[in-house]
Each structure stands twice: as structure tokens, then as C-alpha cells.
Image (cartoon, helix red, strand yellow):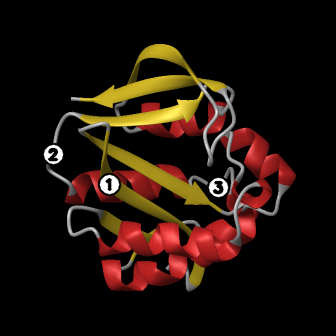
């Protein structure tokens, strides 16, 4: 299999996906791009507990993203604010290779729910492009206050019908 072509593993394999997110959270540029601050707030135990809750939810579809045999990220479909949403995380060293775009396309082929929503820091142009390449459209922008996981930022809110 070509190294750029991601494979999605069954949800049980997604249990290893937090490791890639935890590792990536140590990169300051990655945190700034995603407007994410796990490494500056909370412990790794809290992070792992957060992921355990995600994976325990039967309504969440969680997948590991592999490039070849390498775990490079995770992608999931979940409810956020009572709407079906998608989210993903790709290790920084794999950015710009089309992996997120392809992984999202694979997930969209598996998930029938529409509309789907995504919320992305407005400054995260790469992620907005990944979503738009898969048919999502920006519906609006909103200011979001800081919380335990994210700093205050302006978000792009996207929707796929």
C-alpha cells in the first residue's frame, strides 16, 4: 500500500490513537495551529481518561489512521452540542501529504448521518481545506471562550449536507 494512502482500522484499534495525539500535543506549532492546549493544562492521566470516555461511548465512531503500517492519527464521528460532528488529528510530521483528506473521505463513506458538522480554529487553514475538499462548507464564524482544553479563539463552523 502506498505510504500516503491511509487505512482506517476498526474501532478497537483506535485505543492506540491517543498515543499519537498525546505525542503531537508536545509540539508547540501543532497546539497553536489547532488551538489546543492539553499539554499546558491537565495531566497525561486526564488526557487518557478523556480518550477512554470517548472510546467507551457506543455512539462514537473512532478510527486509527495508518499510513502504511504507521499510526499517524485518529479520526472520529461524535455528537457535539447535539449535532453529529467529525474530528481528526494527524501527527505534524505527516501534514501536507493528503492523509487527512483521504481519511475523512473514508470515514464519510462509512458514516451515513447528514448533516455532519465540524468546528475548526479559523487560523487552521489546512484543516478547513481538508473539510472543504470533502464537501463541507463554512456556515459561519464564532468566537469561542477558553475552556480546560482549548484557548479562546475564532472558530470556523462547517457543515456537510
Name the residue tied to disc 1. Answer: 77
Mark 2 to mark 1 CA distance (whole Å):
10 Å
Sequence-wise, which precedes: disc 1 or disc 3?
1
Graded by Cα atoms within 10 Å as few (under 14), some (14 to 19) or many (20 or more), the crowding at tag 2 reads: few
**Residue 116 percent coordinates (x, y):** 27, 38
Position of 52 relative to 112 (above/below):
below
Neighbourhood count class around disc 3 (C-alpha, 10 Å): few under 14, some 14–19, many 20 upward: few
CA distance separating discs 2 and 3: 27 Å
Seen in the picture, residue 146 relative to 66 is either above or below; the reply is above
Mark 2 — residue?
A: 113
Q: Please provide percent x and percent y for residue 92.
A: 74, 58
Residue 3 in view here: no
**Residue shown at 49% from the left, 80% from the top:** 1
Q: Which residue is mark 3?
A: 97
Q: Could you say which is closer to the camera, residue 119 or residue 160? A: 119
Which quadrant of the rendered structure holds the C terminus? top left
If you read the primary sequence from the N terminus, does the residue marked by circle 2 or circle 3 appear first? 3
Residue 113 lies, with reference to residue 75, above or below; the image says above
How far across and down, in percent of the image, does residue 44 sit? 68, 74
Earlier residue among tags 2 and 1: 1
Which structural element holds mark 1? Answer: strand
Left of 39 or right of it: where is 126? left
Q: Quadrant of residue 113?
A: top left
Q: Nearer the viewer, residue 93 or 61?
A: 61
* SS type, badge 3: loop
Quadrant position of residue 38: bottom right
Amino acid at each position: 500500500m502506498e505510504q500516503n494512502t491511509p487505512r482506517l482500522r476498526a474501532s478497537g484499534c483506535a485505543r492506540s490513537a491517543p498515543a499519537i495525539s498525546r505525542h503531537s500535543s508536545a509540539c508547540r506549532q501543532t497546539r497553536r495551529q489547532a488551538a489546543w492546549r492539553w499539554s499546558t493544562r491537565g495531566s497525561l492521566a486526564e488526557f487518557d481518561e478523556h480518550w477512554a470516555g470517548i472510546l467507551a461511548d457506543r455512539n462514537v465512531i473512532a478510527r486509527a489512521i495508518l499510513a502504511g503500517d504507521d499510526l499517524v492519527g485518529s479520526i472520529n464521528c461524535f455528537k457535539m452540542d447535539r449535532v453529529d460532528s467529525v474530528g481528526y488529528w494527524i501527527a505534524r510530521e505527516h501534514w501536507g501529504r493528503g492523509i487527512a483528506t483521504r481519511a475523512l473521505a473514508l470515514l464519510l463513506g462509512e458514516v451515513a448521518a447528514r448533516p455532519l458538522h465540524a468546528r475548526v480554529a479559523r487560523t487552521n487553514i489546512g484543516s478547513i481545506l481538508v473539510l472543504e475538499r470533502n464537501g463541507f462548507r463554512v456556515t459561519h464564524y464564532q468566537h469561542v471562550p477558553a475552556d480546560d482544553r482549548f484557548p479562546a479563539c475564532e472558530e470556523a463552523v462547517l457543515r456537510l449536507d
